[in-house]
Image (cartoon, rainbow, N blue to C red):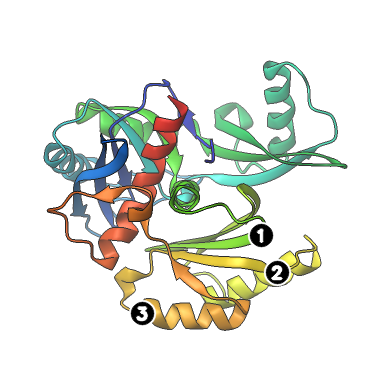
């Protein structure tokens, strides 16, 4: 599974995860039952508009008291975990693919090279940045790295909310990376290229993967130019022209259930991509406890939460 992380403070695997988006705070607990991952608890609290405004280069938490109270109620229903994986919205970070022809052998030197590479396009001082990276594809012309860049004080806003609620955020990551983690855990990784679309209120992200490695990532504001189908079509054209893609073996969708138009969107995307579009099912990666009823909207909510917890269990 993918090893992305905006902030990694410890290697101990949390049993609970929370996600703070512009519209809601949600959380889940994954436990081991007879060798199988099982979602044993979940909770969601809706947030008033403009309470949280995910952004790369501005304060995100507009009403701390309201968000803290919502997070506290979610954690209460999860059994008050002391250590959590924390997921934030994709617009909080800038994702770049960096290719290095020569990779320094020392980790400290590699980090300095990567920070210098992303410094050119950073919308704020690199000295104020939280930079994380993971190795991607290796080819004859060099080694790819998937790099995430976020303002350190913005990440601290979210970590402080957890701290106030009595939980330590050992991992901080963005939503789509953990949707990828769940997709990879839920089924065998395709040998070829595949596309993933993750939708949330206010934004959507598209990732293209070659096997288990990300080769393209784009996050798009929902109020930006063009529809999601248009952006997917543009991505497919870029994939064919610039990445020399041979076609997608599958396409996956997460987050569309809340709109009530998931089938319409699936058909629209399938026409643009000339392939079947499937909705990600996190229960193939972590079963639900018997008492939990699986609506489409709940499965979308659980997908990134399951992803960060399964990744943490694997890394521990």
2 up-or-down from 114: above or below: below
Q: Residues within 10 Å of mark 3 (few under 14, many from 20)?
A: few
Asked whether the residues under the numbered discs 3 and 2 touch, taking CB atoms below 8 Å apart as contact, a structural biologist would say: no
Along the line of sight, the residue nearer the viewer: 69 or 26: 26
Q: Which residue is mark 1?
A: 193
Where in the figure is residue 270, as x and y percent of width and height? Answer: 55, 79
Q: Quadrant of residue 11 in the image?
A: top left
- First in residue order: circle 3 vs circle 2: 2
Q: Which residue is mark 2?
A: 247
Q: Which residue is mark 3?
A: 261
Find numbered disc 1 in the image and state the secondary structure of the residue it sits on: strand
Identify the image quadrant of the C terminus.
Answer: top left
Q: CA distance from mark 3 to mark 2?
A: 26 Å
196 up-or-down from 117: above or below: below
Q: Quadrant of residue 114 in the image?
A: top right
Asked whether the residues under the numbered discs 2 and 1 touch, taking CB atoms below 8 Å apart as contact, a structural biologist would say: yes
- First in residue order: circle 3 vs circle 1: 1
Q: Nearer the viewer, mark 3 or mark 1?
A: 1
Q: Quadrant of residue 239 in the image?
A: bottom right
* Horizontal side, residue 291 vs residue 133: left or right: left
The reply to whether residue 60 is in sight is no
For image coordinates 62% across by 79% down, the residue present is 274
* Horizontal side, residue 57 vs residue 82: left or right: right
Find numbered disc 3 in the image and state the secondary structure of the residue it sits on: loop
Q: Residues within 10 Å of mark 1 (few under 14, many from 20)?
A: many
- First in residue order: circle 2 vs circle 1: 1
Q: CA distance from mark 3 to mark 1?
A: 26 Å
Where in the figure is residue 38, as x and y percent of width and height? Answer: 26, 43
* Horizontal side, residue 257 vs residue 190: left or right: left
252 up-or-down from 151: above or below: below
Q: CA distance from mark 2 to mark 1?
A: 7 Å
Q: Residues within 10 Å of mark 2 (few under 14, many from 20)?
A: some
């Amino acid at each position: 599974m993918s090893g992305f992380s905006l902030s990694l403070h410890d290697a101990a695997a949390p049993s609970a995860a929370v996600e703070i988006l512009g519209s809601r705070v949600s959380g889940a607990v994954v436990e081991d039952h007879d060798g199988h991952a099982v979602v044993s608890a979940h909770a969601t609290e809706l947030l008033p508009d403009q309470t949280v405004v995910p952004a790369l280069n501005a304060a995100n938490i507009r009403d701390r008291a309201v968000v803290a109270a919502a997070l506290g109620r979610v954690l209460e229903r999860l059994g008050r975990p002391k250590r959590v994986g924390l997921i934030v919205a994709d617009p909080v970070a800038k994702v770049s693919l960096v290719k290095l022809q020569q990779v320094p052998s020392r980790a400290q030197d590699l980090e300095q090279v990567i920070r210098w590479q992303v410094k050119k396009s950073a919308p704020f001082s690199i000295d104020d940045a939280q930079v994380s990276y993971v190795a991607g594809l290796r080819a004859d012309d060099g080694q790819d790295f998937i790099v995430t860049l976020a303002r350190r004080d913005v990440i601290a806003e979210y970590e402080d909310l957890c701290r106030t609620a009595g939980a330590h955020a050992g991992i901080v990551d963005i939503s789509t990376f953990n949707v990828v983690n769940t997709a990879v855990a839920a089924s065998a990784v395709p040998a070829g290229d595949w596309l993933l679309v993750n939708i949330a209120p206010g934004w959507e992200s598209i990732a293209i993967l070659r096997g288990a490695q990300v080769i393209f990532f784009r996050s798009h504001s929902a109020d930006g130019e063009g529809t999601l189908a248009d952006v997917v079509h543009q991505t497919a054209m870029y994939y064919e022209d610039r990445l020399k893609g041979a076609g997608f073996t599958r396409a996956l969708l997460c987050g569309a259930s809340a709109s009530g138009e998931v089938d319409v969107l699936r058909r629209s995307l399938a026409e643009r991509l000339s392939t079947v579009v499937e909705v990600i099912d996190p229960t193939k990666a972590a079963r639900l406890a018997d008492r939990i009823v699986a609506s489409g909207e709940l499965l979308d909510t659980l997908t990134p939460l399951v992803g960060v917890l399964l990744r943490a269990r694997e890394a521990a």
